[in-house]
Amino acid sequence: MSRIVYVNGNYVPEAEATVSVFDRGFVMADAIYEVTAVIDGKMLEFDGHMARMQRSLDELNIAYKVDYDDMLAIHREMITRNNLVTGGIYIQISRGNPGDRDFIFPEGDAISPTIVLFTQEKPDPRLDESKLTGWHIMTMEDLRWHRRDIKTVQLLWPSIAKTAAIRAGFDDTWMIENGTITEGTSNNAYIIKDNVIITRQLSHDILHGITRASLLRYAHDRQMKIEERPFTVDEVKSADEAFITSASTYVKPVVSIDGVNIGSGKVGKHALQLRQIYIEESLKAAI
């Protein structure tokens, strides 16, 4: 059955969903996106994703104001029309189609943003057996632009890094800049040492993860110690545990880096505990 896609106010079969070849999202990567996880037909962290989406739009001066109620209705309609039980809803907003290719931004309201939503069915992350074996990661230099806090569609380097990892027999790549880990290809990175959760602080260097924010809040509420600072590859190798967070994987344990075991080389108790806490709390708030 063909998916139904939302394009600029219309719900159409995916084969009929089209965007101009002159759209700036296509020719300039001048667009932002968000992904909202869906479990049991309900959305997780919707408020956080909409707030971050507005921030990304504002940072790029894309003239679009998110109407929460309208956007919620559209997302729910996409779930209904696509019979989505478990997976995600992607929304992409570009600056729009100026009628021709040009480096210069169009003037004022001479252009309307292009808004596209589509769904993807995915296995239920709660049943993911890799949580019991953990991920093996490699490292690469971080060659992305320096506004990673804006969730743009400029994903070529993360795609290169992820592909390199998979083809080399790893599960993902953690990227390195100035000697410290920034983040994974599509996730935030953490280590645990002496019962302290360590993760890079928010800045232009990393995406301000929605799952990250919630997990740290849940950990803080349970009196777990947290340090927000950069950490090195050597610190990862000497850590007791490591893990990643993202909207699609929740909390995923990491058990090795560049072929070196982290801790015992097996999934640690804290990562599994944090994963369970996140799943329980996020499902309580699902809408």
Image (tube, grey):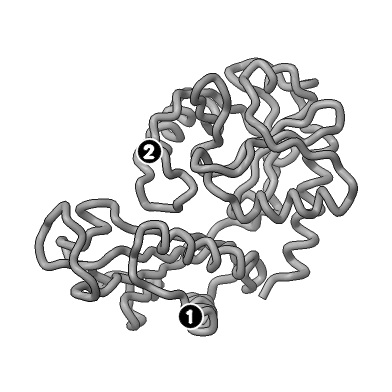
Q: Earlier in the sequence, mark 1 or mark 2?
A: 1
Q: How many numbered discs?
A: 2
**Quadrant in which the C terminus appears:** bottom right
Amino acid type, mark 2: Trp
In the displayed structure image, the side of residue 38 where residue 164 appears, left or right: left
Please say whether residue 80 is visible from this viewpoint: no
| Residue 197 disc label | none
Q: Position of residue 243 (x, y in %)?
A: 69, 36
Q: Quadrant of residue 117?
A: bottom left
- Mark 1 nearby-residue class (10 Å; few <14, some 14–19, many ≥20): few
Q: Position of residue 45 (x, y in %)?
A: 64, 65
In the displayed structure image, the side of residue 265 where residue 144 appears, left or right: left
Please say whether residue 152 is visible from this viewpoint: yes
| Residue 145 disc label | 2
**Quadrant in which the N terminus appears:** bottom left
Q: Quadrant of residue 10?
A: bottom left
| Residue at 76 percent of width and 29 percent of height | 241
In this view, 172 is above or below 87: above
Q: Which residue is mark 1?
A: 67
| Residue at 62 percent of width and 49 percent of height | 249
In this view, 162 is above or below 61: above
Helix, strand or loop under label 1: loop
